[in-house]
Amino acid sequence: MRDDEAMAVAAFHPDRTVVAAVPLERGLLRLGAVVTDTATITTGGKPTGFDTLTPGAMVRIEFRRVPDGDEATAIEVLREARG
């Protein structure tokens, strides 16, 4: 895993939430974020949907902190999960 990548751990479809493992110097940070309706999700530079977020996929996530948690504003699927 490169330091600008995270691994999608889970994607909860009913509430549009994604959990990712983000590598840090001292281990992994588990990031949970709501994927907003205005968030862009891309695979290979092309727009895709929330359904493409599967556990094990390598992703790049842009997020912002809000009073009640974190919101993902952009997710780029870098590599699909290995099956």
Image (cartoon, rainbow, N blue to C red):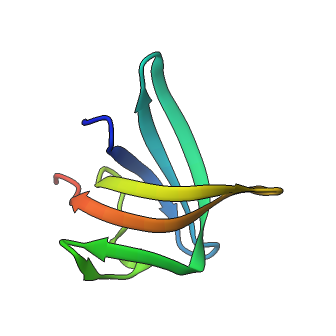
Quarter of image, res 78: bottom left
| Number of numbered discs | 0
Residue in view at x 39 percent, y 75 percent: 41
Quarter of image, res 71: bottom right
Pick whichever, 34 or 61, lies toward us: 61
Location of the C terminus (image quadrant): bottom left
Q: Position of residue 7 (x, y in %)?
A: 35, 46
Farthest top residue in view: 26
Left-right relation of 75 to 70? left
Pick whichever, 66 or 55, lies toward us: 66
Left-right relation of 44 to 56? left
Farthest right residue in view: 67
Q: Position of residue 21 (x, y in %)?
A: 44, 40
Q: Position of residue 50 (x, y in %)?
A: 43, 76
Quarter of image, res 15: bottom right
Left-right relation of 56 to 71? left
Q: Position of residue 55 (x, y in %)?
A: 36, 54
Residue in view at x 45 percent, y 68 percent: 74
Location of the N terminus (image quadrant): top left
Residue in view at x 33 percent, y 65 percent: 76
Query: In the image, is residue 30 above or below residue 11?
Result: above
Residue in view at x 44 percent, y 38 percent: 22
Left-right relation of 22 to 57? right
